[in-house]
Amino acid sequence: MREFAWIGLALLFSVVTYCTIGGVYAETPHAADSLEVPNPTTGFQTSYTNRGPIFILSDSDFSSYGFPGTGDKNSPYRIEGYSITDSNFELIVIENTEAYFVIQDNYLNSITSSLDAIYMRNVKNGRVYNNILVSNRHGIFIDTGCQSMNVTSNLVWDSSQSGIRINSSSDVRVYHNDMHLNTYNGIWANSSTNLDIWNNTVYDDELGIWLRNCNGSQILDNTLYGNDNALWISHNSNSNNILFNRIFDPDDVSPNTCGIHLSHNAHDNSILNNTVSNSTEHGFYVEATSGNNTIKWNTFIGNNLGGTSQAFDAASVEVLYNYWSDWTTPDDDFDQIVDIPYSLEGPVMNDDPFPLTKPANPPEFHYLTPVTILHPNGGESIPDSVTIQWTSCYDSRNHAVNYSIYFTHNSGADWEKIVGNLTTNQFEWDTTAELKTTHYLIRVVAECSEGLTVSDESDGEFSLIAHTLSDPTITSPTTSGPFDTSLMIGWNDAVDSWDYTVRYSIQYSSDGGSSWTDLTSGLTGSSYQWDISEVENGEDYVVKLIASADGGLTSEAISVTFSIQHGTTPGGGDGDMTLVFVGVGAGAVAVVVVLVLAIRMRGAVET
């Protein structure tokens, strides 16, 4: 039965394929051939036989204790069904053996968390299966010289150091275990090779899985959350495959601090097809000494919120074809690759040149990618309307997504709904009736058809400005005249606070402003040439300039009082030019010649 289970696992992973930009990639994990993998447990034993600690220092000791089995592959010695609690000794110690054995269905508690529950050294062909290990120093410690070991379906928690520790060993499989609330590490492997760490759940530890000076190993299909570093590869750990791991909190209660961390000369590692979500810091972090690693086809969702990037690279690693939830547009050529590279934090200024618009391997959990407000996002002065814009959300289960928009005019103290059930990523908001303040924020809430929501608010406050129209200023006429045949009327423009078009009309009065006559309207320039040749003479003329803007606003200006006198020499007023030439002759006799040149403009023309 166990043989068939392993074959099933091998077949399952050998057919895993996923989309790439150049074809189809298939990854088949390697496996040691000396041990079969049993089916994952469906539950733990509920009754045990009490006994004291067990010390096996050679193959013959198994028989001396009277454990059932013969020690060969088909009939391993069985240490099973015991409850061992002791604060003075390690609970099960096995050293220097090659006989096949299994430690299964036991309850092990060292009470003070100062001793190991299971300690093995220089051991081959051992299996640790379906045990409960509580309040120990290490739940399971596989120490120097161990080979062909299998640790499967154990529950390990409240260890003062590590749930499972592997040191200076090889060909060790760690499958389907649950490790949590261990003070330092869920799984710590040091100076070991050819490890298979598959399908474990590790949470609420300082480090989830730590490879230190380990080579040729596979970290596959694990779930890690609530850890400071979910997955740390360090200290000359080279040529390892980190595949299909889920580094996120499914309930969004206890996120990881950092997703994947490479440091201290970790080289040639392949980090492929992992999902890293909601880490409070970076989704992956690569220190300067750890180059030549490949980070490809991963899904990064909502990590390092508030930072400039979900990833940090100080070593120029190869970063290609990853999905970044905060970088999904534009894709103008519809090739499912964002047209602009995704920038990483770090001194080498690396980027992902081919960020994907959707995950290469959609995560099995349901999520919405974050929504981000694009405009208004702080600092804007909004007139009568504004186009609110935001990024579209991706639903991992392809549910329909609707958007609702809210605003506050008092820095978030109160929120009002503008509109709901939108399916586009922009909306034209008419603000003419809203209170004019400088403390506005926008909130966009995205919700899928099953009620999952994400939201975003403007990064800073923006203003709604009142609609005003300043007064124009008349620049001509500025003297009292008299004027004869033509008068230039000029002005400085009125300013509309909402940038509406301003048009001008002109009236004149011959009685100092008591009554008015329309002269012209619909002007958009800043001057008008008035033909006054047919206007009656008078001493009390004024002109009124009226500015009008869309929305009904008007403002005006009135000129100085001036006179119109036909057939007389003007008094230096606007519209005529006088040239005076003075000559001095011999004998100090002055001859004054006055030449009056009147430039008469016939007809009124706007300039």
Image (cartoon, rainbow, N blue to C red):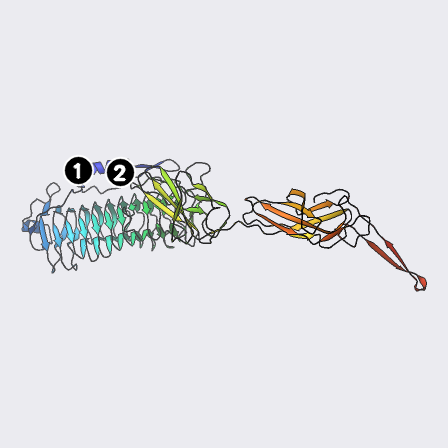
Q: Quadrant of the C terminus?
A: top right
> Disc 1 marks which amino acid?
Glu
> Residue 13, labelled with which disc?
2
Within 10 Å of disc 1 (Cα), the crowding (few <14, some 14-19, many 20+) is few
Residue 589 x, y percent position in the rendering: 93, 62
Q: Secondary structure at mark 2?
A: helix
Q: Is residue 106 visible?
A: yes
| Image-quadrant location for residue 606 | top right
The residue at the point 44 percent across, 39 percent down is 331
Q: Secondary structure at mark 1?
A: helix
Q: Quadrant of the N terminus?
A: top left
Residue 385 x, y percent position in the rendering: 49, 45
| For residue 132, side relative to residue 243 (left or right) | left
Q: Nearer the viewer, residue 553 or 90?
A: 553
Q: Nearer the viewer, residue 290 or 577?
A: 577
Q: CA distance from mark 2 to mark 1?
A: 16 Å
| For residue 78, side relative to residue 277 (left or right) | left
Task: Give the mark count.
Answer: 2
Q: Which residue position holds label 1? A: 3
Residue 552 x, y percent position in the rendering: 56, 45
Within 10 Å of disc 2 (Cα), the crowding (few <14, some 14-19, many 20+) is few
